[in-house]
Amino acid sequence: MNNSSITKRWIKGSLTTTIIVLTLAVGFLMIFVRNSYYSAAENAILSRINTINGTLTASSRLSDSERTGMLYRMSEQFTEKDKFEFMFIGTNGNILATSTGFVPSDDMHMEDVRKAQSAPDGISTNVYRTQMGEKVLTATCIIQPAMDSIYAIRLVTSLEKVDGEINILAAFAAMMFMAIIAFSVMSGMYFVRSIVYPIREIESTAAQISKGEFGVRIENNYNDEIGQLCDTINNMAEELGRSDEIKNEFISSVSHELRTPLTAIKGWAETMSNNGADTATVEKGTQIILSETERLYSMVENLLDFSRLQNADIKLTKEKMDLFAEIEEVAIMFTPRCRQNGIELTYTETDDIIPVYGDRSRLKQVMVNLLDNSIKYTPQGGKIEIIIDNDKKENLVTVSVQDNGKGIHREDLEKVTQKFYKGKGAKRGSGIGLALVKEIITAHGGEFNVESEYGLYTKMSFTLHTIRSMKGK
C-alpha cells in the first residue's frame, strides 16, 4: 500500500461522492431559484392583466367605442411602463398599439395569444426571446365580451433583470461549491497524509523487523488506531527479539546437551575399540553408550513431539484408561532415581479407579516430564509429592507434582511454559519440557498451571475431565 493508492481511493470514493452530491444540490437549488423567480414574475404580470381584465368586464355595458377609448386611456395612464409594456392585439392578430408608442415589427412570437384562445379563462403566458435576443415574459387576455377593433390585451416584461439576479445567485452558488470542494480537498489531503505518513513509517520499520532487526521501534505519537497499531508492532518486535534470543539460547543449550552424550559415546567407543580394553571396561562402556544413546533419543523425541503438536501433525490415540494406574507406574519408575539423589517421593495409593479418555503414552510422558523437572531442581534431602484430587461431582481430576526445591522467579513464572524458554538459574535441558506438557494437556481438553514461590516450592498441576466408568468402548 502506498501514498498514491490511498489518495486515489479517497478521490474515487469520498471526493467524487462529495462533488456529485454538491453538483446535484446546486443543480436542484438553481432550478428551484429559477422556478421561484419566474413564478414570481408570472404572478406579478398575471395580477396586472387580471386587474385590467376585471375593469373591462365591469364596463361590459359600455359601447365598443367607449370601451376602446377607456383602453387607450388606461394605456396612456399606465403607471408601470418601466416594468411592463401594454399592447393591444387586433382581430387579425397584429399588434395595434403599445404603451410605449413603439409597435414592434416582429410578430413571430404570438404563442401566448393562441394559448389564450383555448384557455378556459382566456388568459395565457409565454416566455421567448425577441429578435434582439432579449428574453421576455408575456401575458395575453382575450377581451370578453369581444370588441370590434381590439381582440386581446397583452403585457410584456423583460426577464433580463430576473436572469441577472439568478446569475448572481448561480455565481455565488458556484463560489460556495468551489469553496466546499477546496475545503474538502484540503481537509481530505490532511486526513490522508495523517494516515499515509505514519503507515509509511510503520512500513519502513516493519521491513527492518522482517530483515531481523528486532531492536528497531516506531515512535508512537498517536492516540488513535494508528497508535494501537504502533504499540502492537513494537510489542511484536519485542517478542520477536525475545524469541530470537530464546532461539539462540535454545540452539546453544541443545548443542551443549547433544555434545555431552556424544562426547561420552565417542570417548567410550574409542576406549572400547582399543585392543587392550578388558571385559569390565567394555561392559561399562556399553552401558554408558546405551544410557547416553537413550538420553539422546529421549531429547530428540521430545523435540519431534513438540514440533508435531505445534503443527497439529501428531494424532492422539485416545482410549478409556485408569489415570491413577499410569501415575503410579511412573512414580514407581522414578522412585530409585529419587532415592539415589536423596529425594523423598511420595504419593497416596488408592484402590479407586480414575477413568479418563486419553492417550496413555502421552499422559505418561506428561508425568515423566513433570517428575524429571522436579528432580532437577529439588536438592538432596528435599521432597516431591504427587497429589491427586478427584472431584467426582464435577467430573474433574487434578494431578499436582509439588516439590520444595528452589522455586521459580516471579518474572519467569508466566513464561516457563513457552517453548525454548529457560529462566534464571535454569539447569540443562532443551527448554521444551513444560511447553510439551502444556500442549499435550491442551490437546486432551484440559488445563495446565504452574504455581511457585522462589526459594520455597513449585507446584505443577494439570486438570482433565473424567468419564463415568471404564465399561464400554
Image (cartoon, helix red, strand yellow):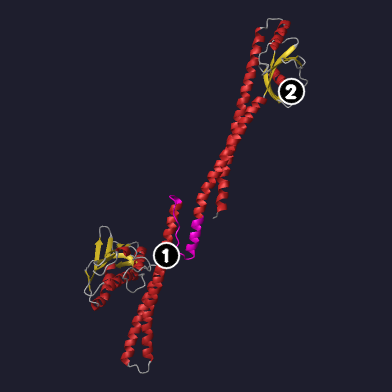
- Residue under label 1, please give it: 241
- Is 192 located above or below residue 297 in the figure? above
Residue 424 pos. (x, y %): 32, 69
User: Distance from label 2 to label 1 (Cα)?
Assistant: 89 Å
In the displayed orientation, state which residue is furthest to the bottom. Answer: 276
Query: In this view of the protein, which residue sits in the foreground, 260 or 277?
Result: 260
Q: Secondary structure at mark 2?
A: loop
Residue 396 pos. (x, y %): 28, 60
Residue 184 pos. (x, y %): 55, 42
Q: Is residue 229 left or right of residue 104?
A: left
Instruction: Tell me the number on the disc at residue 109.
Output: 2
Q: Is residue 213 magenta?
A: yes
- Is 263 located above or below residue 28 in the figure? below
- Is 344 located above or below residue 134 in the figure? below
At horizontal 39% and vertical 74% (from top left) the residue drawn is 252
Q: Earlier in the sequence, mark 2 or mark 1?
A: 2
Q: Amino acid at mark 1?
A: Gly
Asked if the residues shown at circle 2 and circle 1 are in contact, with their CB atoms under 8 angstroms apart, the answer is: no
- Tell me which segment is drawn in magenta: 200-225
Q: Secondary structure at mark 1?
A: helix
